[in-house]
Image (cartoon, helix red, strand yellow):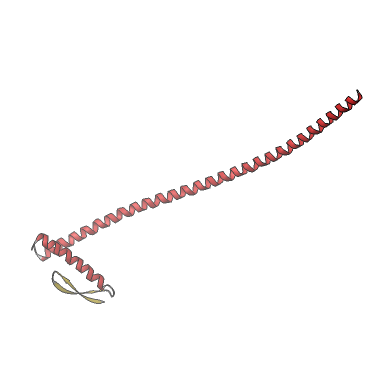
Amino acid sequence: MANVNVKFNNKDYLLSCDDGQEESLKKLTKFLDKKYLEFQDKLGNIGENKLLLITTIHLIDEYFDLKQKISKQKMKLDEISNKFKEIKSLAIEYKKDKDLEINRLNEELENFKKTIEENNILYETMLDKTTKSLEKIISNTESLSKIQ
């Protein structure tokens, strides 16, 4: 335990605190003294105990207001966090759906390419048969022409 000399309401006090907390205790005492003197200037000489009570109530009021604001901000942050998680989940689901759609379209494209390739082969085969048939007809026609 450490001992600290502090000044409050123009009086010196010796207070004890945990080791390493000396500076913090001095700052808190200085803050409390400042608030106390502000109320003393506003309210005049109403007695030390009453003034100390009013100062304490005012500080507790500020503390609870701040605590309530922090609680509201935490709730808002939780809401934002939940919405972010929801959006993230939707984005992941959207990506999965798009990946499935891309895969399906790629499969359709591959099938379409195969169909085109098969049709090209069929077309070439038919063209070859047609060409041979035409050549045969031309040859037969020429042969008939020579005979006549």
Does 57 sit above or below residue 131? below
Question: Does 71 sit left or right of 140 as displayed?
Answer: left
Q: Position of residue 24 (x, y in %)?
A: 25, 70
Identify the residue at image location x=30%, y=53%: 72
Does 87 sit above or below residue 47? above
Q: Position of residue 88 (x, y in %)?
A: 45, 50
Q: Position of residue 73 (x, y in %)?
A: 31, 54
Give whichever of 69, 135 is nearer the camera.
135
Question: Does 46 sit left or right of 96 as displayed?
Answer: left
Give whichever of 114, 133 is nearer the camera.
133
Q: For the C terminus, which image quadrant?
A: top right
Q: Residue furthest bottom?
A: 2
Question: Does 43 sit left or right of 66 as displayed?
Answer: left
Give whichever of 46, 41 is nearer the camera.
41
Q: Position of residue 37 (x, y in %)?
A: 14, 64
Q: For the N terminus, which image quadrant?
A: bottom left
Give whichever of 33, 72 is nearer the camera.
33
Q: Based on the displayed image, in which of its 4 quarters is residue 18 positioned?
A: bottom left
Q: Based on the displayed image, in which of its 4 quarters is residue 71 positioned?
A: bottom left
Identify the residue at image location x=68%, y=41%: 114
